[in-house]
Image (cartoon, rainbow, N blue to C red):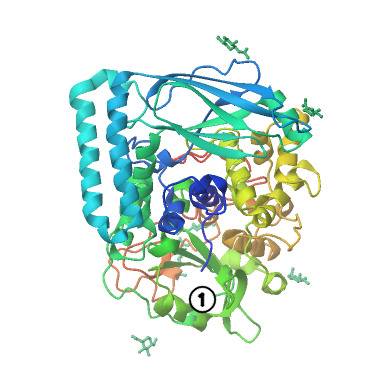
Amino acid sequence: MEPSFSLKTLLTISLFLFFITPQSSLALKLPFHPQDLLPLLPRQVSWPILNRLNGAVDLLPTFVGAASASNDTGDWKGACFYENRAWMEFHNKTGSEFGGGTLHLKVIRMWIFGVLGFIEVVGFGIWILNVLDFSVELKLVRVWKKSLWGLSWVKISTFGDMVSEAHSWTCMDIYVFATPYHVTWDYYLLSREHTLEFKEWESKAEYEYVKNWGVSIFLMHAGMLGTLQALWDVFPLFTNTGWGESSNIGFLKKHMGATFEQRPQPWATNISVDDIHSGDFLVLSKIRGRWGGFETLEKWVSGAYAGHSAVCLRDSEGKLWVGESGNENEQGEDVIAVLPWDEWWDYELNKDNSNPHIALLPLHPDVRAKFNETAAWEYALSMKGRPYGYHNLIFSWIDTLDGNYPPPLDAHVVASFMTVWNHIQPEYAANMWNEALNKRLGTQGLDLPDILVEVEKRGSSFGKLLTIPEQDDWLYTDGKSTSCIAFVLEMYKEAGLFDPIASSVQVTEFTIKDAYTLRFFENNSSRLPKWCNDGDDVKLPFCQIKGRYRMELPEYNIMDPYPHMNERCPSLPPKYFRTQSC
Ligand SMILES: *[C@@H]1O[C@H](CO)[C@@H](O)[C@H](O)[C@H]1NC(C)=O
Ligand SMILES: *[C@@H]1O[C@H](CO)[C@@H](O)[C@H](O)[C@H]1NC(C)=O
Ligand SMILES: *[C@@H]1O[C@H](CO)[C@@H](O)[C@H](O)[C@H]1NC(C)=O
Ligand SMILES: *[C@@H]1O[C@H](CO)[C@@H](O)[C@H](O)[C@H]1NC(C)=O
Ligand SMILES: *[C@@H]1O[C@H](CO)[C@@H](O)[C@H](O)[C@H]1NC(C)=O
Ligand SMILES: *[C@@H]1O[C@H](CO)[C@@H](O)[C@H](O)[C@H]1NC(C)=O
């Protein structure tokens, strides 16, 4: 299916993989089985800043500082360790060229957290049992949930203010430590000075890096149980069940204010293909299964009410086609495809098990008059068969230094996440972002660690590097890179819809929401096709052609394109406030 999730999603997933991928040494240290957790990963969707407990946000590590040789890494508060300090000591125990180092971490906890820690360990044990034997799942989960309730009760009733100074309900602090070349993790239950050994620095570059900038320390601020609980909370979003569907709906209602009102039957429109024209835009919203979960995540971070998109094209004989980036081919790869309408529509009606909701957004007649079909076809055929655009996925999201990361996410976390990914899937990482990062630096073939080192050398920061806008004409080793929405908009650009400012618009910076807010679509409801919203008592400004729930596209069709549109936009949930002409 289509990887309709955007870069934001990938990040999230990577963080997950952080914990579950079997090849990574850190995952090996974890007590759960990767397969059990895999489906959980992506819905880190929850960055519910509002929900302190059970938030997917609990799955994100927080950057607390870097430990270098001078021990000035200030205090930070863990979940239950109220005073923490860290410093690095270099040594040469193995007699290797660059030596190694010991990271000292001094943690001091309040006694009361010892008690809570014990309860947490019990909960953790239950989780492990649960994961090892799925058949006991329900019963144990109930027990587990109960013990959590008990914990909450303990907090509220007994310790009140005192405990609220701790940053979470649970009491085992998990830390992640990263250099550009290494990522590892550890957890602490007891107060004392802990050490973490780096036997040998991998290279002179790592040695120099650690000497100058230290080892980055991240805290899983929810502690062990909070982290696992958040995983559990995220899990159902990805299951292909009624439960999964209602989790997705519940999530979108709660965090985006989506309404999901039921429509009258029929839920699929009897379309007359003659009324669909070249350039008409298709937006899809999937709410079930793997893709449902991914899209939920994407919608939440980007503020879009749809998670996938495609475009209609008519050929010279009048036959209708659909162009789609993210169509799964027979080998199971996501590629760019141009399919006959009937084949596409039949798949969506009968074979797509993600319960897709689909809307057709017809172009405004004036815009359609501008649409150069020849140029659109040339573009579509030049892209056909190319892989889905993973390279630049993340960059349409990150436009600013601090306006795109829901806390506790930040550029440090992105860097460590990428580092982990780089270890787990070196080839895929090169494919995913190393190339795009090299383009931003103006370098070629640098590996991720080299990129991180190079950025610091230039006196810049990784955070700044991420904000550099993608350019539509950047050519990657597998060609131009387009996600589902970049493919549609690039076609619009080729077909002349962004004229006369086309050369100063980078469509790879657009999200799906940015696309449907463009003032490109029919605004006179009496010109919509007769079958449009036929049978529904609410007349939408666009044509919903499939789905049990009524789709909504807030701010549909209101924004004229302008040069450098969407290159510097903040996007923070829950309001997704967009600054003027960003
Ligand atoms: C770090 O600080 C502690 C106490 O503040 C001191 O005893 C220790 O020597 C310092 N370590 C280094 C490497 O400066
Ligand atoms: C560590 O010891 C080895 C052998 O004694 C030496 O060749 C190397 O230069 C030392 N490395 C550092 C960083 O001191
Ligand atoms: C769909 O509409 C066509 C004519 O527009 C009609 O012939 C056909 O019976 C309709 N199909 C259904 C299932 O209503
Ligand atoms: C449409 O695009 C084709 C191919 O790019 C070009 O040759 C043609 O002149 C364009 N037509 C108009 C009306 O601009
Ligand atoms: C909307 O379209 C109808 C039919 O084409 C036309 O009669 C009417 O004037 C249009 N309304 C506006 C406001 O353009
Ligand atoms: C639709 O937009 C055009 C300009 O693009 C405007 O002139 C017209 O009044 C609008 N029609 C409606 C019904 O809003």
Q: Nearer the viewer, residue 55 or 514?
A: 55
Q: In the rendered image, which residue does mark 1 sit on?
A: 276
Q: Is residue 399 left or right of residue 296?
A: right
Residue at (59%, 39%) from the top-left corner? Answer: 183
Residue type indicated by callout 1: Ile
Residue at (70%, 49%) from the top-left corner? Answer: 434
Element marked by disc 1: loop
Q: Nearer the viewer, residue 526 or 5?
A: 5
Relative height, residue 151 to residue 509 (above, below): above
Residue at (74%, 46%) from the top-left corner? Answer: 447
Screen quadrant of the C terminus: top right
Quadrant in the rendering for residue 237: bottom left
Q: Is residue 256 left or right of residue 69?
A: left
Is there any visible trace of residue 483 in the rendered image?
Answer: yes
Relative height, residue 112 to residue 301 (above, below): above
Few, some or many residues within 10 Å of mark 1 (<14, 14–19, 20+)? some
Rendered location of residue 208, percent (x, y):
75, 28
